[in-house]
Amino acid sequence: MPGLIGYGGYVPAWRLARKEIGAFLGARAGRGERSAAAWDEDTTTMGVAAARIALASQTETATGPLFFATTAPAYLAKSNATAVHAALDLDPGAGAFDLGGGLRAGIGALLAAHRSGGIAVLADQRGGPAGSADEALGGDAAAALVFGGLRPVAELAGVGHATREYLERWQVPGEGRVRNADARFVDHVQAGLIDGAVTAALKDADVPATDIAHVAVAAASSKAKAAVAKAVGRPPTDLADDLASPVGFAGTAHWALLLAGLLDRADPGDHLAVVAVGEGVSVVVFEATSALPAYRSDRKAPALADLLAESTPLPYGRYLAWRGTLAVDEPVRAAPQPFSLVAAERNARWKYGLVDENGQRLADEQATVVELAVDYAADSPALPATLAAVEFRSGRRLTVELADAADVRVGDQVEMVFRRIRTTEGVHDYFWKARPIRR
Amino acid sequence: MTRHSIRDKVAIVGMGCTKFGDLYDRSGADLLTDAAGGAFETAGIANEDVDAFFFGTVVSGVSGLTLSRALGPGYRPVSRNENMCATASDALRQAAYAVASGACDVAMAIGMEKLKDYQFLGLPNAQAGTDGTGSWLSSPAAFSMLVPAYSRRYRVPEEQIKEAIARIAWKNHHNGALNPRAMFQREVSLESICSSPAVAGRLGVFDCSGLSDGAAAAIVVPAEDAHRYTAQPVFLKSISLIVGPGDGAAHPQQDYSTFPEVVRCAEEAYEHAGVGDPRADLALAEVHDCFTPTELVLMEDLGFSERGRAWQDVLDGCFDLEGELPVNPDGGLKSFGHPIGASGLRMVFETWLQLRGEAGKRQVGNGRTRAMAQNLGGEPGALVCAVTIVGSERG
């Protein structure tokens, strides 16, 4: 069976401090922070970001199908996996499939990718009405796991599930609102499922609980930790950091984000267990191999800890405007028209993959800022927009918007990131932006 | 490069120009009628005497019907063209070639834009029909890149450039205050200019010209017939159009401190017109001051200033109304306003008035007999440029 040959976790740089929510709404303040996708990010773009991290450092080239899982898809009734596939410039012969619907999707993507030697890309964006628990405790993040043949850095040693039909959090198509069941009811159901799933996973991995080096719990509710601690026989304080701050619960991607964090610390031979609680429980047990330390030291992309450390405060008002919760006045502008679907398909490799006419994938190259334009007249929800003429090593230039731009100067180095430029008449316009390299 | 010069083959014998501005009460047809009327009157002809029309507009019309409906009576050739901000210059060029070819005895070039009917800020959206990957740089942002590029290339501090471009804004408003057709007819102080809200980069509100409504027209005839229409025709010395490859954004050598399209267009225009030293030969120049740093760079690209020296020449007043070479004596795009499809002909209208001694308080009196109108459209790295040189004398 294929093993894990690459992994990556992605967290957006923006952080919403929970006490700001409290201060703004005159309610009780929470503690810590949650991650927030930028106005030009969505689950597709975050999935791409995580997958690029995983693929940049994979020990061999993944060739299998791509499985994309999210509960907050950019498009309903349209594949988002194909957009992720295109942005990664994967082989047209490799399949790309969406898993969605609920929190189980991410585990489904794992099992499918593992079985077929492919790539599982998980992304989620969690929020809710202003002042809701979903908003305060949710997080936006993505993770990717790549499976292949020869030199795995970890093996999937075992899985265990407890499946049950119950309503926890749900949305009916055509309705804007997401509904939640009573939290204590949900905790009660989950507490009843955790032990069975943990036991099944340990049995499948043929590892006793005491031999698991690190246990992490991905759950919306903090009560799940206590149940897991009991199931594995260790105090809750011994469980790994669940990233409730600075990320929050990132839906179907959260367990994989925690796994990435554990893999970054594990020693060869360590067993790592991640308990994914939500609409049922699944437990995955991985075993780190001797190839893992070299993978970490050789990696060509940031580690999760690097991204967690990049923290830009996001005022709550702006978060609300970005999420569309707050209606913001717009200047009277020429109505943007969607790009031509035909021209975009013709140029799909450039538009999504940033592969130029010479077959060069500019997306993987760094560039230098040659000229800057800070634009207060741009048609953008985040003014001023910063645009830059950037030059790649080949000499080729591109004029692009700068993403998450702060203090940028001519001469700075940038890397390319995949973002959603705008949405016009229900059509998402994806392309690449440049982002200053801060690490 | 156009192979043959049409120097002194064609003359402008009538011109009209409406007031420019936010003309909410006037339709496109009203503006066309007004501008054409002025041209007919000054040429002493009637609508029926025109053999062919060359109508330029960017967004304010479709086909020649827009003009035909406005002017009547119809059943004549009306070519409609668009070439971004150089539209009206291109219309004039086509009218001139029609006459020079011998196919027409009387042609009208007319440009019109009714932007205020669209009710939005800025220029119309250009992404429709593309794959959505084109740059979303706004026009001010694109031209704002001239400032740091010029500063780095010539090692002139940006503050110094800011001073020079503020002076350009002040000059053009000063000139526009003397122009009854201009959109803005008030002087603006340097303090107001320097403290205006940021629009893009180092550019503030007063560094940007205002889009507006307006129309302008010219009647063009063979040079040997000119005396039949007016005692003071204006002869076309050259009219050059250069469209760049449009690849500046991707080009490794793209230099945001100069416009190669303008340099080449001016070279050809000067050659065909026999202009050796523009600063000494020209009575005045109308140039495309869409943004103040654009005018600064144009001074060098058009050969009025040495490379790296335009900022100093501007501050020394060389291009003021009373200066050595008045630039934009009618107020330029800055204070006259910019109806995209009409501006090229508005520029020529000022050369027409000036060479005929009809510019009133703005009259330039340096005795020179040739003048230039330069018009560009697009953004740095992807420009179209037109240069028209006219003269009051043949030869």
Image (cartoon, grey):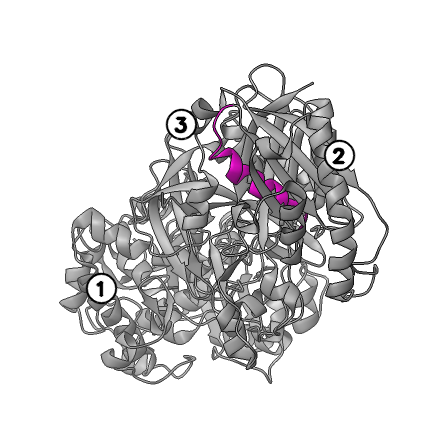
Check the image and report above or below for B167 versus B281: below
Which chain does tag 2 point to? A
Check the image and report above or below for B143 versus B36: above
Task: Give me the C-alpha separation between circle 3 and circle 1.
Answer: 75 Å
Residue reaching furthest to the top: A150
Circles 1 and 2 on the same chain: no
Q: Nearer the viewer, residue A80 or B15?
A: A80
Residue ID at (25%, 70%): B166
Circle number at residue A297: 3
Q: Are marks 3 and 1 in contact (CB under 8 Å)?
A: no
Residue ID at (42%, 80%): B181
Residue B292 makes an appearance in the image: yes
Circle number at residue B368: 1
Q: Which residues are magenta?
A: A251-268
Callout 3 secondary element: helix
Circles 3 and 1 on the same chain: no
Crowdedness of circle 1 by 10 Å Cα count: few (<14), some, many (20+)? some
Q: Is residue B158 left or right of residue B83?
A: left
Callout 1 secondary element: loop
Q: Amino acid at mark 3?
A: Ser
Q: Amino acid at mark 1?
A: Arg
Q: Are marks 3 and 2 in contact (CB under 8 Å)?
A: no
Crowdedness of circle 3 by 10 Å Cα count: few (<14), some, many (20+)? few
Q: Nearer the viewer, residue A156 or A375?
A: A156
Residue ID at (33%, 37%): B253
Q: For mark 2, what is the residue?
A: A200
Asked if residue A252 is among those painted magenta in the image, a careful observer would answer yes
Q: Is residue A21 left or right of residue B69?
A: left
State which quarter of the image contains the N terminus of chain B: top left
